């Protein structure tokens, strides 16, 4: 079950160094760990101008994929929200996010060089601080990665669906996320993102309410069960829209 954690703070506050240590610690604990880096600059690209892959993209290729003996890189020329990207990382246990400090519904660790910075950056989703802190929340030393990983294991929660459907028993996703982070609600209480029916459109995970999930599941199972050779527990269907 994927759980994201934001490492937030101002520039040059030690976020990257902390993330390096945290990724190593979580990996040593047996977790599959990925990272996301927020790059706020407009027009930024990882692709080098005038490189072959850059020329491919300029000609209209999307995505552009490069393969080397040690690496596969996929460049997609499109906008995407943090929530969309998180829901695509279903094979990971943790994803450590550098930046996106203003995001909600995700537990945060704030790196602060002063109590003033801690006060400016603190919000309801902040579970702890590195360096300086406020509101009696845990303040850890950057070298105490073991305690930091313990805190993240305890407090971080899976992504929420964003439907504000109320199936979790709370009025909206924000209230549920805060309750789950504080241990007042089950971390896996966001039913639109739970099985047994998973919907993806063009690769993007779509949260669906329990009623719709039940209708889809029963309809598909009923149809497939009538087909010869279609016995099994897991059903996968790919549908392409007819644009005629």
Image: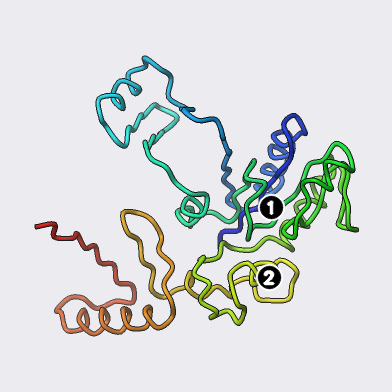
Residue 180 numbered tag: 2
Query: Where on the picture, by quarter, is residue 202?
Result: bottom left
Residue at left 59%, top 72%?
Answer: 172
Residue at left 41%, top 60%?
Answer: 205
Count of labels shown?
2
Please state the horizontal and vertical placement of residue 46, each as a whole percent of the image. 47, 27
Please state the horizontal and vertical placement of residue 27, each as a whole percent of the image. 65, 47
Q: Earlier in the sequence, mark 1 or mark 2?
A: 1
Is residue 193 shown above or below 61? below
Which quadrant holds the C terminus? bottom left
Which quadrant holds the N terminus? bottom right
Mark 1, residues whose alpha carbon is within 10 Å: few (<14), some, or many (≥20)?
Answer: few
Is residue 48 shown above or below 43? above
Q: Nearer the viewer, residue 238 or 42?
A: 42
Q: Is residue 97 left or right of residue 67?
A: right
Q: Which residue lies under the disc numbered 1?
A: 29
Mark 2, residues whose alpha carbon is within 10 Å: few (<14), some, or many (≥20)?
Answer: many
Q: Secondary structure at mark 2?
A: helix
Q: Nearer the viewer, residue 122 or 197?
A: 122
Please state the horizontal and vertical placement of residue 62, each as a whole percent of the image. 29, 36
Query: Where on the picture, by quarter, is residue 15?
Result: top right
Please state the horizontal and vertical placement of residue 122, each as a whole percent of the image. 78, 51
Color encoding of the figure: rainbow
Q: Is residue 81 left or right of residue 179?
A: left
Between the residue at mark 1 and the residue at mark 2, the CA separation in whole angstroms equals 23 Å
């Amino acid at each position: 079950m994927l759980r994201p954690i934001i490492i937030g703070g101002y520039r040059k506050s030690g976020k990257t160094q902390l993330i390096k240590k945290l990724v190593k610690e979580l990996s040593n604990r047996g977790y599959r760990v990925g990272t996301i880096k927020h790059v706020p600059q407009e027009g930024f690209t990882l692709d080098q101008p005038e490189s072959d892959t850059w020329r491919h993209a300029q000609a209209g290729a999307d995505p552009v994929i490069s393969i080397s003996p040690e690496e596969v890189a996929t460049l997609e020329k499109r906008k995407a929200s943090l929530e969309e990207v998180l829901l695509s990382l279903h094979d990971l246990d943790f994803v450590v996010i550098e930046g996106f400090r203003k995001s909600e519904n995700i537990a945060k660790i704030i790196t602060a060089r002063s109590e003033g910075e801690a006060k400016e950056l603190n919000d309801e989703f902040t579970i702890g601080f590195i360096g300086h802190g406020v509101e009696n929340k845990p303040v850890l030393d950057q070298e105490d990665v073991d305690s930091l990983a313990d805190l993240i294991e305890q407090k971080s929660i899976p992504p929420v669906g964003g439907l504000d459907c109320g199936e979790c028993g709370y009025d909206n996703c924000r209230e549920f996320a805060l309750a789950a982070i504080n241990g007042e609600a089950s971390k896996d209480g966001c039913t639109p993102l739970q099985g047994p029916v998973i919907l993806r459109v063009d690769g993007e995970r779509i949260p669906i309410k329990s009623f719709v999930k039940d209708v889809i599941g029963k309809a598909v199972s009923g149809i497939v069960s009538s087909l010869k050779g279609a016995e099994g527990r897991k059903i996968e269907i790919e549908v392409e829209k007819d644009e005629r």
